[in-house]
Amino acid sequence: MTKTICSYCGVGCGFEVEGKVKGDKTHPSNEGLICKKGSLEDKVVNNRILKPLFRENKEDEFREISYEEAIKIVANKIKNTSPQKIGFYLSGQLLNEDYYIANKLAKGFIKTNNVDTNSRTCMASAVVGYKKVIGSDYVPLTMEDALNCDLYILAGSNIAEAHIVFFNRVKKAKKKGLKVVVIDPRFTKTAEIADLYIDINVGGDIYLFLAMQRKFLDDGMIDFEFLRKKAEFSEDFFENLRQIDIDEYLKKAGVSKDKFEKLIELWKSNQNIVGSWTMGLNQSSEGVEKNIAFINLFLLTGKMFKNLNGPLSLTGQPNAMGGREVGGLATTLAVHLDYTPENVKKVEEFWGTTAIPTKIGLTADEMVKKGNLECLIVAHTDPVYHLPNRHETEKAFRDIDLVVELNAYKGSETSKFANLIIPVAPWGEKEGTQTNLDRVITLQKPFREKQAKQDWEVFADIGKALGFSGFDFSSSKEVFNEYKEMTRLSPDMNIYECDYDELENKPFRWGKNLDSAIGGKAKLIWIDKQNRSLIPDSEYPFLLITTRLANHWHSMTKTAQVIKDEVDFVEMNEEDMKSLGIDEGDVIEIVSKFSIISLKAKKSKIKKGVVAIPMHLKGINYLTNNILDPISKEPDYNHTPVRINIL
Ligand SMILES: Nc1nc2c(c(=O)[nH]1)N[C@H]1C(S)=C(S)[C@@H](COP(=O)(O)OP(=O)(O)OC[C@H]3O[C@@H](n4cnc5c(=O)[nH]c(N)nc54)[C@H](O)[C@@H]3O)O[C@H]1N2
Ligand SMILES: Nc1nc2c(c(=O)[nH]1)N[C@H]1C(S)=C(S)[C@@H](COP(=O)(O)OP(=O)(O)OC[C@H]3O[C@@H](n4cnc5c(=O)[nH]c(N)nc54)[C@H](O)[C@@H]3O)O[C@H]1N2
Ligand code: SF4
Ligand SMILES: [Mo]
C-alpha cells in the first residue's frame, strides 16, 4: 500500500493506493473521504507523451528527438537570449520541488524575473487582498475553523463541485448546527444545503458588502474596541460608509431587502463566523476590491484573529499554496519574501549567486502578450487554453521563437503552438511535496514505474547544461531539504521544522504560531464599487460566467480519459429561454465581441440575464474578455457581455 495525496483540488485529500485508490482515514484534510474523480485518478494512464518532440517552425510536423538534444536546444536558446526575453510559465499543480528548482533556475541563475504561474488567473486577487489587509499572504484559517464555527458564508464559491470532500464535511457539520449562507448568481449544488441563499447579480458583491457594512454601523455592530487594538483606520472610513444608501446598493446588488435582513440577523445571532470565497470574487476586474470588501466585514465586527473566525480563502489547485510559498508568483522573490534589496541579498547568499533581478517581473497574461518574449517555458499548465481572449493569446504564442512545453499527456492546446515538447512523469510516477489550502504539506509518492523525468529534473538538467552549479540533486528529498532550509529566511515559515521522511505518515501544517504572528495589526481600507468591466448593451445583453463541474478537471487531459460527463452546454434562466423561444437541448450560438461558440441550451436556476458555460470546454476562452484587475492582474473571466443567436 502506498500513501499519497490527490493531485486535483486544494482540499488535498490523503490517499491509500493498493489495487485501487481509497481515502486515507488518518489524513486531516479528508478523514477517509474521497470524490469520484479522485477515486479514478489511478485509472488515468493513456495519452502519455514519452518522447521529446521538436519542430523548428510551428507550421512543421513534430519529429522525435532524444532527451539530451531537447535539453541542448533549450540551453542554447537561453544562452543566446537576453534574460528579459525569457519567461517561465509555471503552475499551481507543480510539486514544491518542481517549483523550487524552476524558480531557482529562472530568478537565481538565468536572472529573469518573468516567472509567473496559472495561479495568477486563480488566487492572485486573494493574495493581494490578504497582503493589503493583514500584511501577508498566509491564509490564516483552516478548514476546521469553517467546520466548527457557527455561521459559514460562501461567496462566489461552489464547494459542492470544486472542493467536494470539504463540502461533504460541511454537510456533516450542518447536522451539528452549522449554518450556511451562499452568495452566488446561480442556485448551485452548494446553495441546495444553504440556510440562506443570496441570488446576487454578477459583479454585485461590493454593493452587498458595503450595504452590510453600513447596516453594521447603523445597528451598533462595529467592534470599535477591537479596531482600536487591532487595526489601523481613519475616521474617513466611517464618513464614507455613512454616504452609502442601503436600498440603492441592494438594488444594484440584485438582493432583496428580505434576504438582506435575514443575512444581518444571522450575523447578529451567531458568535463565530467564517467566510470563504473562490473564483466568484477573485476572477474579476475588481477582484482585489471584492476581497478587501469581504474581509472588512470580519474586521469591522471583530471576527478576526481569533479561533473559528475570519476570512478563509479557498485555494483551487492542489499546490497553489506551495507555489505562493516557494515564490512562483512574479510578485514574490522566494519563500514569501518580496523584492526588497535586503531580501535579494539574502536569497543571493543562500543560492550562491549574484545579480538576481531586483524588481518584480511580468505577470502571466502580460508576459505572454506584452513581454515580446523569445523563449517561453511552460510547465504543468495550458495557457493557450486558460488565458482570456484566446485569439490574442494564440497570436502571442505564434510570435514567440521557442515555446517549450513540459507535459505528461498529449493534446494540450499549448502543444499546438509549441516548438519543443518535453515529456515528464505525472502523478503516480513522480515524488514530492504538496501544500493544500490550509497549509498542510503532504508527500506525493509514486506507485508506478517512472517513464520520464519529473519536472524538477528537467529544470535541473537545463541548469546543468548551462553550466550553473547548485542543480546537482539526486532525489526529491534532497531538493525539499534545500527548500526547507531556505524557509529560515522567512520570518514566519517554519517548514524547516518538518522531516521529509515523516511526511508520508504525518502531514505537516506549517505556521502553528502564525495566528498570533499575523494577529498583529490589520489595515481597514475603504473600498467602493469600481466599474472596469465591460457592460452589457443592446447588442450583447447577457453576461457570461464560466464555471466548474464536479467530475472534470480544467482542460480534462486526465478526467476525460475516465469520465464522460458532458461539458458542451450553456446554462440559462428558464424565463430567458422562454422569451427567446429556446427549448432544453436546442443548439444556440453564444456570441461575444471576441468570438462565437455553439452549444446546447440547459435550464438552470441562474439569475436572469446571466449565462454560464463550463470552463472545461477547451475553446471557452475564445469568448472571454481581456480585462485584468489592475493590481492583481487576474482576468475578468466572469464578466463578458454576450448575445444569444438562435440557429
Ligand atoms: N471539479 C473540479 N474542482 C475544482 C477544479 C476543477 O477544474 N474541477 N478546479 C480547482 C480550481 S483551480 C479552482 S480555482 C477552484 C474554483 O472553485 P470555485 O470558484 O468554487 O468554482 P467556479 O465554478 O469556477 O466558480 C464559483 C462560483 O462563482 C459564481 N460567480 C460567478 N460570478 C460571480 C459574482 O460576480 N459574484 C459571486 N458571488 N459569485 C459569482 C459562479 O456562479 C460559481 O458558482 O476549483 C478547484 N476545484
Ligand atoms: N474562462 C475561464 N478560464 C479560466 C478559469 C475560469 O474559471 N474560466 N479558471 C482559471 C484558473 S482558476 C485556473 S487554475 C486555470 C487552469 O488552467 P490550466 O492550468 O491550463 O489547466 P489544466 O488542464 O489543469 O492544465 C494542466 C496541464 O498539465 C498537464 N500535466 C498533468 N500532469 C503533469 C505533470 O506531472 N507535469 C507536467 N509538466 N504537466 C502535467 C496536463 O496534461 C495539462 O495539460 O484556468 C484559468 N482559466
Ligand atoms: S476533493 Fe479534491 S483533493 Fe479530495 S479527492 Fe476530490 S479532487 Fe481530490
Ligand atoms: Mo484555479
Image (cartoon, rainbow, N blue to C red):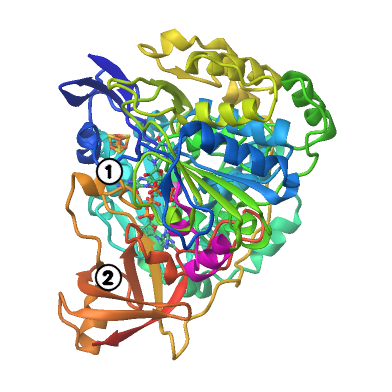
Q: Within the image, what quadrant is residue 377 found in? A: top right
Residue 232 vs residue 335, the one in the foreground = 335
Q: Secondary structure at mark 1?
A: loop
- Callout 1 amino acid: Asn
Q: For mark 2, what is the residue?
A: 570
Q: For mark 1, what is the residue?
A: 47
The relative height of residue 263 versus residue 426 in the rendered view (above or below) is below
Residue 329 visible to an observer of this rendering:
yes
Taking 149 as reference, is 515 left or right? right
- Callout 2 amino acid: Val
Residue 146 vs residue 177, the one in the foreground = 146
Taking 263 as reference, is 570 left or right? left
Which secondary structure is most common in the magenta stretch?
helix
Q: Residue 166 location in percent, x, y?
A: 31, 36
**Split into 4 quadrants, where in the image is the N terminus?**
top left
Q: Within the image, what quadrant is residue 621 found in? A: bottom left
